[in-house]
Image (tube, helix red, strand yellow):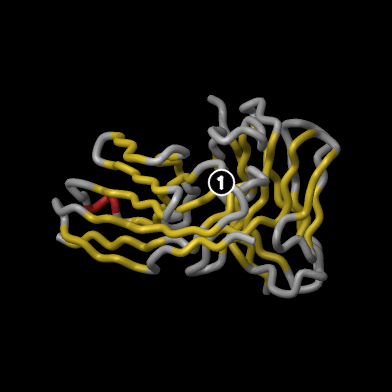
């Protein structure tokens, strides 16, 4: 089976940096995805990691360590519109993504 | 514009009635998926299809049925056997399931409320 763990909720201040962690245990590994989901809307793709290291995309970066079963999403220069749920999803041996419960990020002024 | 459409956005049904949720994509994707999302929960896989006329059960398939008669369409029927059907239902598609890099694209979702 697969197990994906991420914090339920985080709060941060506008302009700050926040790191959202995701740990996983899977049978096989074929990539890790991060999605952003605003309340009542569809998830939208943020980033993808399959090799160890950091992937940077504007204000958002994602890191992966396959040996530790660990990833994080780093959000810089936080804006109010970044308040959303952030979903970690892992493709195991079946190539079908399994999603974590999501981390609700609240950005306050 | 390419994308995934789901209709309707809100759906109300009486307990004991079957209801079918629509999902259409014009991305020419082979793979399609149905997820259920409950408050404070992640996405749980109901069914997925890798090719026309074939589909597989996900983690929570009981009380649901699907069909894949056309590449573009993957409707989900919530049957009266589903004990707790009130939820937010999301449809997704990807180019295929067998490549690591293939990203899922999601429709806007249907919020089903059973009264």
On-image quarter of the C terminus of chain A: bottom left
Place of residue B7 in the rendered image (x, y in percent of width and height, measured from the top left):
64, 46
Relative to the observer, which residue lies in front, B9 or B77? Answer: B77
> Quick one: B27 or A62, which is closer to the camera?
A62
Q: Residues within 10 Å of mark 1 (few under 14, many from 20)?
A: some
Residue A66 image offset from top left, x and y in percent: 45, 48
Rendered view: B113 above or below B9: below
Q: Is residue A1 left or right of residue A32?
A: right
Question: On screen, B103 above or below A40?
Answer: above
Residue at which label 1 appears: A29
Lateral position of residue A89 relative to residue A77, left or right: right
Q: Is residue A76 above or below residue A26?
A: above
Q: Nearer the viewer, residue A17 or B85?
A: A17
Give the residue displayed 65% in from the left and 56% down from the top.
B45
Label 1 marks which chain's residue?
A
**Residue B83: % across, % down:** 74, 74
Q: Residue at x 64, y 46 (%)?
A: A93
User: Residue B71 at x, y = what percent?
Assistant: 75, 31
Image quarter where the N terminus of chain A lies is bottom right
Residue in front for this viewpoint, B81 or A4: A4
Please tell me which residue is depicted at 54% across the width and 46% down the height of the picture: B108
Name the quadrant containing residue A23: bottom left
SS at mark 1? loop
């Amino acid at each position: 089976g697969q197990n994906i763990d991420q914090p339920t909720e985080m709060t941060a201040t506008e302009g700050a940096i926040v790191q959202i962690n995701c740990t996983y245990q899977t049978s096989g590994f074929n990539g890790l995805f991060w999605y952003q989901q605003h309340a009542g809307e569809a998830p939208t793709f943020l980033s993808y990691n399959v090799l160890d290291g950091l992937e940077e995309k504007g204000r958002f970066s994602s890191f992966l360590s396959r040996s530790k079963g660990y990833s994080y999403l780093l959000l810089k220069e936080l804006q109010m519109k970044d308040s959303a749920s952030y979903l970690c999803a892992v493709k195991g041996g079946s190539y079908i993504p399994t999603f974590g419960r999501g981390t609700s990020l609240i950005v306050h002024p | 514009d390419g994308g995934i459409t789901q209709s309707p956005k809100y759906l109300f049904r009486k307990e004991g009635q079957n209801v079918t949720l629509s999902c259409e994509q014009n991305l020419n994707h082979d793979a399609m998926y149905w997820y259920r999302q409950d408050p404070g929960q992640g996405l749980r896989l109901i069914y997925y299809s890798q090719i026309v006329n074939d589909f597989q059960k996900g983690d929570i398939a009981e009380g649901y049925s699907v069909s894949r008669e056309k590449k573009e369409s993957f409707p989900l029927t919530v049957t009266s056997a589903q004990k707790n059907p009130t939820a937010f239902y999301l449809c997704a598609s990807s180019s295929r399931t067998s490549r690591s890099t293939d990203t899922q694209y999601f429709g806007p979702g249907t919020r089903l409320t059973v009264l």
